[in-house]
Amino acid sequence: MGFIAWIVLGLIVGILAKWIMPGHDGGGFIMTVVLGIIGALVGGYISSLFGFGEVDGFNIPSLIIAILGALLVLFIYRKIKG
């Protein structure tokens, strides 16, 4: 996937993760996109490590993996932030 595709996927995934796990995190829109992109990368890494698949485009399995990764990153972000 190209750079723009990662940003768009991160935006979508960040918004969905924020919708699933609401709360005040600070940072606004930019932080949502950043956490979504990092979540997609983390989700893709973990799922490929365990052989479940990888984030390789705009399809349902990749979106699910990216959302799960974004939820994990959001959870860790909230624990670290306080």
Image (spheres, grey):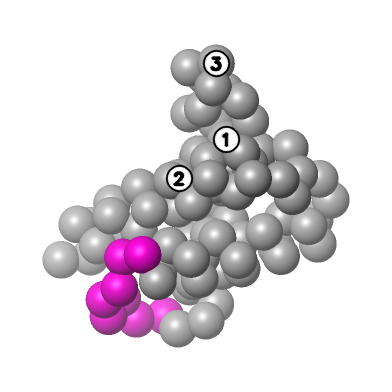
The amino acid sitting under disc 2 is Gly
* Above-or-below relation of 44 to 4: above
Of all residues, the one furthest to the right in this rendering is 2
SS of the residue under disc 1: helix
User: Residue 49: image x %, image y %?
Assistant: 52, 19
Q: Amino acid at mark 3?
A: Gly
> Which of the marked residues, 3 or 1, is nearer the chain's N terminus?
1
Q: CA distance from mark 2 to mark 3?
A: 15 Å
Q: Nearer the viewer, residue 57 or 30?
A: 57
Quadrant housing residue 21: bottom left
Quarter of the image with the N terminus is top right
Tags 3 and 1 touching, CB below 8 Å: no
- Alpha carbons under labels 1 and 2: distance apart: 7 Å
Three-letter amino acid code of the residue under disc 1: Gly
Write down the residue under mark 1. Answer: 44
Residue contact at pointers 1 and 2, CB within 8 angstroms: yes
Spatial CA distance of label 3 from label 1 is: 10 Å
Q: Is residue 69 magenta?
A: no
